Image (cartoon, rainbow, N blue to C red):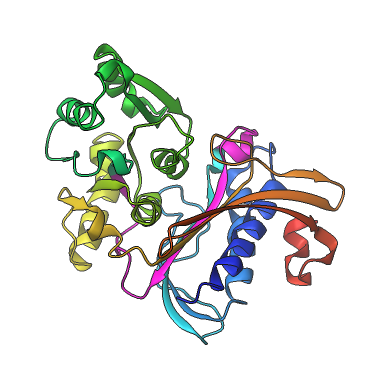
């Protein structure tokens, strides 16, 4: 990929974040997501790439989506695969809570895992603990192995996870071991990145979340020389084995089989992101642990974007001021 594409992709997540921000605190997560999706699609279609969405977002939440297989870009230039999450944290945006982002990851064609939109168990560490994780082992043993690799006691290990009912027992077990646990309402892409950021105290990210976020996380973790493993799980194993969940879960298993993927099998980092020639962009919607949120006054807004280029392992933070009425007219209905 041409390195000048990086700034183009930062413009894509900026537009999605600004569109989502218009719905901040209005209680309608699908409207926020829909606006971000449309803005992201408009901007992607202006980039000189022959792009295909290989990981989209939406089926789990029954939300609008950039669908898997959708072609984007002008059709000219590099052939690329794209993994998107137009708003990571739709509920946080709707409720005005912290850590909402617009994110995408782009790689050469064939770079990213093609998987259905379903749940994924994820375990992530930074470069210093690379090689110390194995999802085939119990979580407690993984935590002990990570602590040993980092040369610190369990009581100094910091794990970040999602504050979901499905994690309540896991959080209690980790705290019983003496591990420090930070539980975010949503946002496991941001949580995963924190394991690799030099200014962060986070050692480990563990959760069961969305597969789209898992592949995006794998892309950026590969770019930052961290480590990650994942495991696709059908809905009825995660949300409870009732009739509706089992019906959806069985459909997910059928889709996995048709795509040549085995649910329940441990996926290594290289299975999810096959090389580090990736570009990752995330723009903050609300203030969080990773990025500042949008500040808007009238038709002027400021954004902060994290832009990572894996090939050179360069991390950039871009602070931008936008005059929204000067944006592409196609975006006006989503921004103004």
Task: Please name the residue shown 76% across and 62% down the image.
Answer: 333
**Residue at the spot 39% in from the left edge and 38% down from the top edge:** 195
Q: Nearer the viewer, residue 13 or 186?
A: 13
Left or right: 216 with respect to 5?
Answer: left
Residue 174 in the image: x percent, y percent? 27, 19
Q: Is residue 300 left or right of residue 175?
A: right
Q: Position of residue 170 (x, y in %)?
A: 27, 23
- Camera-side residue: 217 or 233? 217
Instruction: Residue 58 in the image: state x and y as whole percent.
Output: 46, 54
Does 155 sit above or below residue 150? above
Judge whether 237 appears above or below 54 on screen.
Answer: above
Task: Please state, as top left, top right, bottom left or bottom right, where the C terminus lies in the image.
Answer: bottom right
Residue furthest bottom as drawn: 76
Residue with the most extreme right position: 298
Magenta stretch: includes residue 104: yes
Q: Which residues are magenta?
A: 92-120
Residue closest to the eye, 233 or 226: 226
Viewer can see residue 23:
yes
Say if residue 41 shows up in the picture. Answer: no
């Amino acid at each position: 990929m041409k390195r000048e594409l990086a700034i183009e992709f930062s413009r894509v997540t900026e537009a999605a974040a600004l569109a989502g921000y218009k719905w901040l605190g209005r209680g309608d997560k699908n409207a926020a997501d829909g606006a971000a999706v449309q803005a992201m699609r408009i901007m992607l279609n202006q980039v000189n790439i022959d792009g295909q969405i290989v990981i989209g977002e939406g089926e789990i939440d029954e939300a609008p989506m950039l669908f898997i297989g959708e072609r984007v870009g002008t059709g000219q230039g590099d052939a690329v695969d794209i993994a998107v999450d137009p708003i990571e944290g739709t509920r946080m945006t709707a409720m005005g809570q912290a850590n909402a982002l617009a994110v995408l990851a782009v790689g050469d064609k064939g770079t990213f895992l093609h998987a259905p939109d379903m749940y994924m168990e994820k375990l992530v560490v930074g470069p210093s603990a690379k090689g110390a994780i194995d999802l085939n082992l119990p979580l407690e043993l993984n935590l002990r192995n990570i602590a040993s690799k980092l040369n610190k006691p369990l009581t100094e290990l910091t794990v970040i996870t999602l504050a979901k009912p499905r994690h309540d027992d896991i959080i209690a077990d980790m705290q019983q071991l003496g591990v420090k646990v930070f539980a975010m309402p949503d946002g496991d892409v941001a949580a995963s990145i924190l394991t690799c950021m030099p200014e962060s105290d986070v050692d480990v990210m563990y959760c069961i979340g969305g597969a789209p976020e898992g592949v995006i996380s794998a892309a950026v973790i590969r770019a930052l020389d961290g480590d990650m493993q994942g495991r696709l799980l059908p809905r009825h194993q995660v949300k409870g084995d009732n009739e509706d969940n089992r019906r959806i879960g069985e459909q997910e298993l059928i889709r996995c089989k048709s795509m040549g993927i085995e649910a329940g099998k441990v996926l290594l980092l290289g299975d999810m992101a096959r090389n580090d020639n990736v570009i990752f962009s995330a723009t903050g919607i609300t203030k969080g642990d990773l990025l500042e949120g949008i500040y808007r006054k009238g038709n002027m807004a400021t954004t902060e974007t994290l832009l990572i280029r894996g090939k050179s392992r360069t991390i950039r933070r871009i602070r931008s001021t936008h005059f929204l009425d000067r944006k592409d007219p196609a975006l006006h209905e989503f921004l103004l």
